Image (spheres, rainbow, N blue to C red):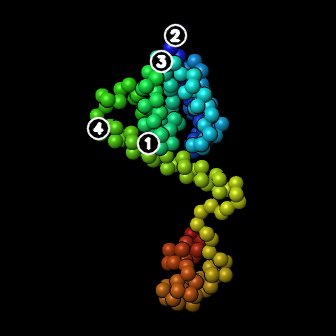
Amino acid sequence: MNSMNFGYTRPLYNDTKSEIQLKLLNNRCEMIFKEKHGSPKKRHQLESLLMKMQPGDSITVERMIVLADSFHNLMELLKVCEKDNVRIHFLREGIRSDQLLNIQLKDIMVFILDFQSEIIKQSTTNGMHQAKKQGKQIGRPKKSDDNVKKAISMYHDGCKLIDIKNQTGISKSTLYRYLESETGQ
């Protein structure tokens, strides 16, 4: 039986419809498994892909974060694929799983740091999306209009910045930001 090259995509924080991934994989893969969500749980398409793999096959992904959500998860997938004699090609990193032993430690560290950064971005995006769905406010809480007005009034009356902060809870930098927007600067 001939070996196959499979692709795998899933929505990411900066590729929510997997369009970038699909563009890269379309001419490289005989079959592409497309996850419908970016969550680390219930990745049915990845499970289907792993079940379909045969010795000699390969998986191509745009980058490491597409395939795994943690370093531990990545190592598990690499072990499974190695045991099944399946190669993984990470396009952005420009490496294949069967080349990992030949890569210098400094290069591996760069890949790991980039991967960790991607994990943080992906999980932050997922968390914010969940919070918004639950109707939670995202970002820093807004200062009350009454406190802002009081702080601006105190500032114009010549009060010391420390007194303004103690009475209103508004810091110097926040006060100046409000003052700038008030004057249109």
Judging by the rendered image, the residue that carries numbered circle 4 is 105
Residue drawn at (52%, 49%), measured in percent from left and top?
121
43 left or right, relative to 78? right
What's under tag 4, amino acid-wise?
Answer: Leu
User: Does residue 127 sit above or below 63 in this rendering?
Assistant: below
Q: Quarter-wise, where is residue 181 in the image? A: bottom right
1 or 2: tag closer to the N-terminus: 2
Query: Which mark is first along the chain, 4 or 3?
Result: 3
Q: Quadrant of the C terminus?
A: bottom right
Residue density around tag 1, few if under 14, some if 14–19, many if 20 or more, within 10 Å: some
Q: Distance between the residues labelled 3 and 4?
A: 28 Å
Residue 149, x across and y down, in percent: 64, 82
Q: What residue would you read off at disc 2?
A: 2
State the SS at label 2.
loop
Which residue is disc 1 drawn over? 71
Q: Indicate which label's residue lies in the foreground, 2 or 3.
A: 3
Q: Are marks 3 and 1 in contact (CB under 8 Å)?
A: no
CA distance for labels 1 and 2: 31 Å
Badge 1 amino acid: Phe
Give how far apart the Cα atoms at labels 4 and 2 are.
34 Å
Check contact, mark 1 vs mark 2: CB within 8 A.
no
User: Which amino acid, by three-letter code, is at mark 2?
Assistant: Asn
